[in-house]
Image (spheres, helix red, strand yellow):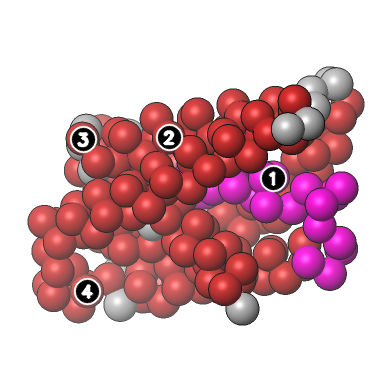
């Protein structure tokens, strides 16, 4: 049970459902309520498709280009750590992606699905937590289900976006994003150490 909880927290940190709320509000500001619901559904399904693809094919792609998973785990951990640092000390996820929403074509795919929901960190997590040599197909399916549960939470929060945003505001979303950054930094360091241990057979 504790392992499932840690996987849930990992995906919650990298997907950051709460931080997606102000991004969703900005992206859908000019749409009617019915259209907002459709955009939320479209963004969630697109993100699920992307992340499930990485669950299924991520390791196969690495094997095809002859990159050992421990090396990818170390590289992924470093990238996740840098991503976490940017969440803590730089602009938080809502602040950074709200700029994208204001300055680019505001669609369900960009910046809502990518990079807000299906973030680079989430793609890396999908690969790292479904290693074929370490996890059975059942365990990989369970991890994918947990990932989808976080996406479902993201979808529900987008549907309730107006009320949630009134409750926590941009400042509250930024605060949660930074707390998630701290958790993600610790997970990233753990991944780097685990990758080094496996690569060198320590």
Residue receiving disc 2: 81
Contact between marks 3 and 4 (CB within 8 A): the answer is: no
Residue receiving disc 3: 89
For mark 3, give the secondary structure. helix
Residue receiving disc 4: 164
Cα distance between the residues tagged 3 and 4 = 24 Å
Q: Is residue 74 visible?
A: yes
Residue receiving disc 1: 127
Q: How far across and down, in percent of the image, does residue 159 sit?
A: 36, 75
**Highlighted range, magenta:** 117-139
Find the residue positioned furthest to the front. 202
Q: Earlier in the sequence, mark 3 or mark 4?
A: 3
Cα distance between the residues tagged 2 and 4 = 28 Å
Cα distance between the residues tagged 1 and 2 = 16 Å
Q: Earlier in the sequence, mark 3 or mark 1?
A: 3
On residue 59, the disc is none
Q: How far across and down, in percent of the image, does residue 80 sit?
A: 47, 37
Q: Quadrant of the C terminus?
A: top right
Instruction: Please identify the quarter of the rendering in which residue 89 is found.
Output: top left
Instruction: Please identify the quarter of the rendering in which residue 2 is found.
Output: bottom right
Report the residue at 19% width, 52% height from top.
Answer: 174
For mark 1, give the secondary structure. helix
| Disc 2 residue crowd, few under 14, some 14–19, many 20+, Cα 10 Å | many
For mark 2, give the secondary structure. helix
């Amino acid at each position: 049970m504790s392992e499932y909880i840690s996987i849930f927290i990992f995906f919650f940190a990298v997907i950051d459902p709460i931080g997606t709320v102000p991004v969703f509000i900005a992206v859908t500001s000019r749409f009617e309520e019915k259209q907002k619901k459709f955009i939320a559904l479209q963004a969630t399904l697109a993100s699920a498709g992307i992340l499930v693809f990485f669950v299924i094919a991520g390791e196969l792609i690495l094997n095809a280009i002859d990159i050992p998973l421990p090396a990818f785990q170390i590289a992924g951990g470093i990238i996740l750590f840098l991503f976490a640092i940017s969440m803590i000390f730089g602009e938080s996820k809502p602040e950074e992606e709200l700029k994208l929403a204001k300055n680019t074509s505001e669609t369900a795919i960009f910046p809502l699905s990518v990079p807000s929901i299906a973030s680079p960190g989430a793609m890396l997590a999908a690969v790292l937590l479904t290693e074929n040599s370490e996890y059975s197909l059942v365990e990989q399916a369970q991890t994918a289900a947990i990932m989808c549960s976080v996406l479902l939470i993201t979808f529900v929060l987008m549907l309730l976006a107006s009320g949630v945003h009134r409750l926590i505001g941009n400042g509250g979303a930024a605060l949660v994003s930074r707390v998630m950054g701290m958790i993600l930094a610790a997970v990233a360091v753990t991944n780097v150490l685990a990758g080094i241990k496996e690569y060198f057979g320590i």
